[in-house]
Amino acid sequence: MSLVTVQLGQCGNQIGGQLFTTVLEDAYGKGGLGCTKKENTVYQDAVLERFFNTEEPSSETRLSCSQQVLPTARAVMVDMEPKVIQQTIQEAKKSGKWQYCEKGQFCQKRGSGNNWAHGYSHHGPTARDAVMDIVQREVEKCDRFGGFLSLMSLAGGTGSGVGAYLTECLREEYPHSFLANQIVWPYGTGEVIVQNFNAALTLSHLYQSADAIIVFENDNLHKICSQLLSIKNISFQDINSVISQELASVLQPAISADSGRTNSPGELLERLVPDPQYKLLNVRTIPHTSERALAFSSFTWPGLLKHLRQMLIANAGMEEGVDWQVKVHSRDRRLSSADFTPSLANVLFLRGKQCESTDISPFSDPRLYSSWVPRDAAFSVFRQQRPFHHYEKYASLLSNSQAPVGPLGSLVGKAWNMFASRAYVHQYLKYGIAEEDFLDSFATLEQVINNYSNL
Ligand code: GTP
């Protein structure tokens, strides 16, 4: 089952490049040492099918793609400035392991200036036909097309505005395909003054067109880099390595414990989004340890899973500093403080030796879940005995839970205050966005917050 990745704006393109590198490192790296040749081949073929086109270029495409038979990413690259796309293509080339198809890009000369309306109303419609042609070519290269994964930030103008517009186009042209958007939530301190406007407008639009929105928060990723990976001068490259590792840990091949099916996008969506009013997902993984420190660490499955469950219920983005005082209680006994974070659905991924014999029952505790979700539908597990990346044991939880309510509430509050003072609003109106569009976005997101608050 293949995924076509749509890389949007600076952030989306930089993450995309790292993601393709990470999935190949995992497939061809240390994880395969203890596996038989056959096991490795099966895994590697599945990774290639999912993320890369490995066909010899046909005579028609020979002119547009490099003739070297390196795996070619199933990617569509979109940006309004050429620089980041060119850098990303160069880095892939330098790796000597994979490449982008040379005709898989769309770019213009000038960015969207951190203005969602510029991206959505101007650049989006201009890009539409050309991008949809590239998308169609990529989809046609897949023997078994499984859906789209779009990568973007919320705060700029291109990833957010063009990204929201193109997601609507994808929904229109591929009404039955799976559409997931991986979004990067801006730093709370805010590098972009209008980031809350851009984020609110993007999220409300994606809520109408995407099937699932996978949220990564730059603040949390930054903490993982500094506190767990001990990185001193943290760059976007460091942060993107963490995002890519976490994403890969849920997208790389694994098998469902109950149905024997693989973790195809459709399979995950069915398990995680039982109602389209709830489509905000997040990923938590454990452990985060630098490769150097791993040599001196030893992890057990019960230890990892105990931490991961506490991260879920205490809504912690990483294993360090988790609040162990937060306890699960019966859902009819609502507490006001140190209340736990309930879920709608969770999918657990276990990767590494002996992962099939560990006890996962603490994740199926019905008190963790909303009462209207059928008991056996709320929790599922996928396993892969092959160690992941450079980790002997690795656990990830892809969740649809109440976790995004806090950050979303704060974002809408800040956007509303700025809108009320009419700051910067005129810069959006000049691209054809009306004041009602802001109000509709705020109302959509308030509804999302209400829905999740009542889980
Ligand atoms: P324009 O610059 O307006 O054309 O839009 P853009 O979508 O290209 O902007 P960009 O993607 O740079 O969006 C800015 C937001 O993305 C800020 O919140 C940055 O913190 C974040 N960001 C930019 N690049 C990266 C990256 O490589 N990784 C991560 N995690 N965040 C990034």
Image (cartoon, grey):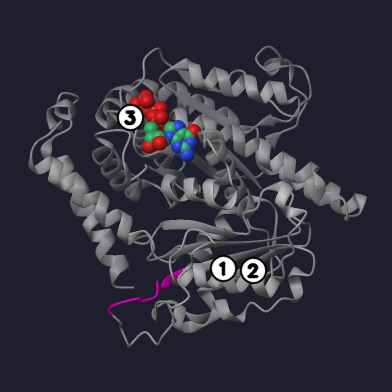
Mark 3 residue type: Gly
Query: Which label belongs to residue 308?
Result: 1
The residue sitting at 22% across, 50% down in the picture is 412
Mark in front: 2 vs 3? 2
Q: Position of residue 296 (x, y in %)?
A: 76, 57
Which badge, 2 or 3, comes first in the chain's sequence?
Answer: 3
Q: Residues within 10 Å of mark 3 (few under 14, many from 20)?
A: many
Query: Which label belongs to residue 157?
Result: 3
Of the 4 image quadrants, the one containing the C terminus is bottom left
Tag 2 near tag 1, CB within 8 Å: yes
Determine whether 223 is above or below 63 in the image. Answer: below
Compare residues 86 and 417 and report the one nearer the observer.
417
Q: Which residues are magenta?
A: 336-344
Determine the secondary structure under disc 2. helix
Compare residues 191 and 430 and report the one nearer the observer.
191
Compare residues 225 and 35 and report the one nearer the observer.
225
Q: Residues within 10 Å of mark 1 (few under 14, many from 20)?
A: many
